[in-house]
Image (cartoon, rainbow, N blue to C red):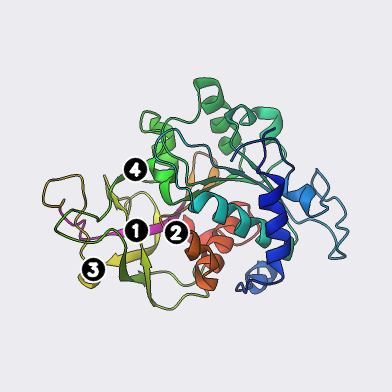
Amino acid sequence: MKYVSRATLAAAVVAAALVPMASASAERSSGDHGRGQKAGQAHGHGHGHGKADPTGRGQKSFRILIFSKTAAFRHTECIPSGTVAIAQMGLRGGFAVDATENDADINDANLAQYDAVVFLCTTGDVLNATEQAAFERYIKGGHGYVGIHSASDTEYDWAWYGGLVGAYFRDHPGVAGVNQQFQVATINVEDRNTAATRQLPARWTREEEWYNFRTNPRNAVHVLMSMDETTYDPRGYSVPGGSAPMGDHPIAWCHRYDGGRSFYTALGHKGVYWKEPLLLAHVLGGIEMAAGRAPFNNCG
């Protein structure tokens, strides 16, 4: 299996003691390239479920796989920064994290080790037909999917995947002479009673590359957060002069899909965002929900 580099995961271990991160313990209690080593191994984790943790925190509660292959645009900040941040979450939260960009790792035997798979800033056509079938079986078996940022800019010709994510990426601001790619805007946190949103304010203002989607997923998913389009210029680059605003504009959601659990958030483009305590709490909660370690009842 091809894992993130030793240097990247070593940085995660060192930085874990230095970077503040909002805890999700309340939620838990209530309910690129190159052959390196697994995040779990970098932290002294065992390879299977329930292996002892030499750091003294006891058993591993679950195991996740980060998958970050790109076949189109590559997010050179999101992928390494997000991988390190999620590895830190595992170190602190007592769950195991592996990471790969090798699509051959999406097979029945390997996926059986994991409670959830995180598609971290993937783009383009990243899985072949055999791998797609294996991932479909994995979700149908009751497992979890987490899509982060450009996971919605992935596998446009695989309709099942589009349903799993909830909506495909259309565009984002950054129209020459019209608006800026990165803007400060306000999110309406519509449901604050999930692990992914409980620590967020009702109105969350921050900078991001704000995604627009080809369709509004609201009728098919449970919307957790949506954009207040009056707080920024949402026109996107796909139309000369700027594409039309979405109006009703979900930006993060969850839903049950084909036997499994799906959580998606469009946040996370810049590397510096992965040091924001609220973003980390949002992503960690979504991982716990998809992995079946936090309540998923609100998601349908």
First in sequence, mark 4 or 3: give its number: 4
Residue 96 lies, in percent from the top left, at: 73, 52
Mark linked to residue 232: 3
Mark 2 to mark 1 CA distance (whole Å) = 8 Å
- Check if mark 2's residue and mark 3's residue have beta carbons within 8 Å: no
Secondary structure beneath dot 2 equals: loop
- Judging depth in this view, the residue of 58 and 45 nearest the camera is 45
Q: Nearer the viewer, mark 4 or mark 3?
A: 3
Q: Amino acid at mark 2?
A: Lys
* Residue 161 falls left or right of residue 136: left
Residue 114 lies, in percent from the top left, at: 68, 43
Q: Quadrant of residue 84?
A: bottom right
Mark linked to residue 168: 4
Mark 3 to mark 1 CA distance (whole Å) = 11 Å
Mark 4 to mark 3 CA distance (whole Å) = 21 Å
Mark 4 to mark 2 CA distance (whole Å) = 20 Å
- Check if mark 2's residue and mark 1's residue have beta carbons within 8 Å: yes
- Check if mark 1's residue and mark 4's residue have beta carbons within 8 Å: no
- Judging depth in this view, the residue of 232 and 290 nearest the camera is 232
Q: Which residue occupies 19% across, 53% down?
A: 175
Magenta residues span 244-254
Secondary structure beneath dot 1 equals: loop
First in sequence, mark 3 or 1: give its number: 1
